[in-house]
Image (cartoon, rainbow, N blue to C red):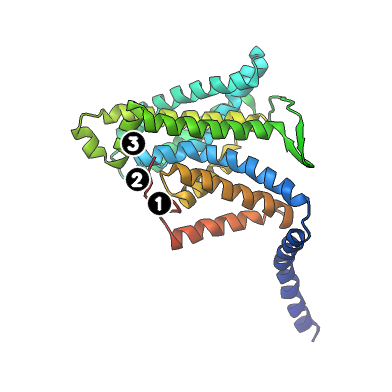
Amino acid sequence: MIPAFGAVLLPLSMLSRFVDPFSAILRDVLGLNPVLLQLVAFALLLGGVYALTALGLTMIFGVMDVINFAHGIFLVVGMYTTLVVTTTFGVNPFLAIGVAVVVLFVLGVVMHLSIIEPILDAPDQNQLIVTLGALFVIQSVIEIGFGPDPQSIGFKAGTLEVAGVFIPNGRLYALALAILAMVVVWAFLQYTDLGREIRGTANNRIGAQYVGINVTRINYLTFGIGAALAGLAGGSVALFNRFDPFSGSTYLINAFVIVVLGGLGSFPGAFLGGMIIGFLQVFGSYYLPGTTYQILIFLLFIGTLLVKPEGIFGGESA
């Protein structure tokens, strides 16, 4: 009798752990709890960083059809470049982020010419293995050079208060950089000859070759720009977060979820997907136990693949 009674109580207890958070959200919404504004502010700030992280990944896929598993470690290189330039040479962190962007652009071009271009027409699994191998090599080099312990650039940005909402300035600067980068990249693709060539290549690679576009040049420039955007994202994260050689894995996983959710190759999709993941993580971290919010993110990922595999903005390439 007792085991049967316990068997009933256990599922009820588990059920309440899932129901209670949603009840708490409903109570806070109906009661206009000020904490909601704080959570929305944090979600927007985090979503902007995630959108910037996914921007380079979706650009590389949209133009070249390459799924770059090394994108996460590009962020980490951006973080450590910002660290070295800031702490060794005493350079302002924002200028150090600019250096990280240049370093990652060069790294992206070199990586593309040396290991991506030769296997560009090979089966997809070759790209997976090559980019995954690059991830492990670069990660090992960083770990040997800096050790596994978390690092920080020691940037003290302070906190801004608006209508009772506290906004960490470091995250606010990161969001501003993310929005600025998206506007600049969008304008570059829309209003420059090189941008139009990139868009033409993304729409039809064979047709681009027929009209005289140097597709090989477009490929390595696109890979370099994608890596540079990852460097910008990594440097922005370094403004407010500690990091280590393995920090890129979390951002890489979320970036893949974002580009699938928003639509592979879509810039608006990357922005909207980043915001959705930012809101899920911030509100999930506050209302759900532990890291349960990650289950919601992966359920959203799986649901997108099942219901709308082309993503929200599927078909709109970079």
| Label 3, residues with CA under 10 Å away: few <14, some 14-19, many ≥20 | many
Distance Cα–Cα, label 3 vs label 2: 22 Å
The picture places residue 301, in percent across and down from the top left corner, at 51, 56
Q: Nearer the viewer, residue 66 or 285?
A: 285
Q: Residue at x 64, y 12 (%)?
A: 89
Of mark 3 and mark 2, the one earlier in the sequence is 2
Q: Residue furthest left?
A: 210
User: Based on the displayed image, in which of its 4 quarters is residue 187 positioned?
Assistant: top left
Q: Residue at x 56, y 27 (%)?
A: 78
Question: Please, what secondary structure does the residue beneath circle 3 have?
Answer: helix
Q: Looking at the image, do the residues carrying marks 3 and 2 touch, with CB atoms under 8 Å apart?
A: no
Q: Residue at x 48, y 28 (%)?
A: 228
In the drawing, does residue 230 fall left or right of residue 3?
Answer: left
The picture places residue 294, in percent across and down from the top left corner, at 62, 54
The picture places residue 177, in percent across and down from the top left corner, at 58, 30
Q: Residue furthest front?
A: 163
Q: Residue furthest top?
A: 89
Question: Please, what secondary structure does the residue beneath circle 1 have?
Answer: loop
Three-letter amino acid code at disc 1? Answer: Gly
Three-letter amino acid code at disc 2? Answer: Asp
Of mark 2 and mark 1, the one earlier in the sequence is 2
Name the disc covering residue 124, or none: 2
**Image quarter in which the C terminus is found:** top left
Distance Cα–Cα, label 2 vs label 1: 20 Å
Look at mark 3 in the image and give the residue it sits on.
Answer: 199
Residue 242 visible in the current orientation? no
Of mark 3 and mark 1, the one earlier in the sequence is 3
Name the disc covering residue 314, or none: 1
Question: Please, what secondary structure does the residue beneath circle 2 have?
Answer: helix
- Relative to 188, does residue 204 appear above or below in the rendering? below
- Relative to 20, does residue 94 appear above or below in the rendering? above
**Image quarter in which the N terminus is found:** bottom right
